[in-house]
Image (cartoon, helix red, strand yellow):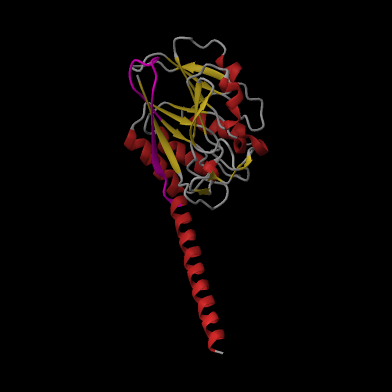
Amino acid sequence: MHRTHRWLRRLAALALVGALLLAGLVLESRREIASVKLATLDLASDKLDGTLRVLQITDTHDQDAARWHQVVAHARDTRPDLIALTGDVVNTYTSDYGRLDAFMTELAALKIPTYYVQGNHDHWEGHLPAVTATLEKHGVTVLANTHTTFDGPWGNLDLLGTTDYYDSDASLPAAMAGTRTDAFQLVLTHDPAIVDDLATSGAELAICGHTHGGQVRLPFIGALYAPGQGFLPDYDKGLFTVGNSRLYIDSGAGQTAPLRFLDPAQVTLITLHP
């Protein structure tokens, strides 16, 4: 009888520890979802004459106003030279673009040049015309397999943007047609599936999102899963060398499933130095 009681007490203790761990995981996940942190990345190039600061905002996924306000606050506090929206500003099931319009009203008030490339959720279910109209209403430049110049104190910069590599007609070669060989080439895209084209492109840097960093990450392992790559993806989050180019993957300010662990919601301030 005493042995049975001891085992019952041990099981109860284990159950309590398990419940506390689960509660801790839930609270940590909620914290990582609710609080949008500012990540930073510093890179250098001999093609630059001065410093360029780019704020990357990706995978916002039509989140609540509290999340939008944090993203705008980061843009206001950092005052970048350029804002890059790298896709999935809405969700597949979005039916009202009011929150996107409100967010862009706040962001546009900062008067920072803003550029956008589409994500898969932005063009699924026919959202793209409404999304691009909303963004363009607020002065955002849409790049779709094309490029523009963004010269300044930092020197000559060609800004390239592709459509969605996940499941559309994306073409980095088309975007690069006519770019300048002496300019720094910054590529905006949504999905790391650009890696094959990027490796042979000669572009210095591409930035993207899409993976959400896996949303759930483990120490020494990284992301457990990413769409389009499956389990234990090669390109999940952070900076990667791709041929003679580099690819930066941001984990995004939103998510499609309400779960994050060791992968907080974020935007990234990328500082490019000479």
Above or below: residue 172 compared with residue 123: above
Q: Nearer the viewer, residue 185 or 139?
A: 185
Residue under the image location 56 percent in, 32 percent down: 190
Q: Is residue 44 magenta?
A: yes
Q: Is residue 128 magenta?
A: no
Report if residue 61 is visible in the image: no
Residue under the image location 63 percent in, 45 percent down: 93
User: Which quarter of the rendering shows the C terminus?
Assistant: top left
Dividing the picture into quadrants, the one containing residue 154 is top left
Residue at the limit of the structure toward the front, as seen here: 3
Residue at the limit of the structure toward the bottom, as seen here: 1
Query: Where does the magenta region start and end?
Result: 34-54
Above or below: residue 139 compared with residue 10: above
Q: Nearer the viewer, residue 258 or 127?
A: 258
Above or below: residue 128 compared with residue 10: above
Rendered location of residue 50, percent (x, y): 33, 18
Rendered location of residue 105, percent (x, y): 43, 37
Residue under the image location 57 percent in, 12 percent down: 177
User: Which quarter of the rendering shows the N terminus?
Assistant: bottom right
Q: How many marks?
A: 0
Residue 247 is left or right of residue 38, and the answer is right
Report if residue 44 is visible in the image: yes
Rendered location of residue 174, percent (x, y): 60, 16
Rendered location of residue 92, percent (x, y): 63, 42
Residue under the image location 51 percent in, 63 percent down: 22
Q: Nearer the viewer, residue 99 or 245?
A: 245
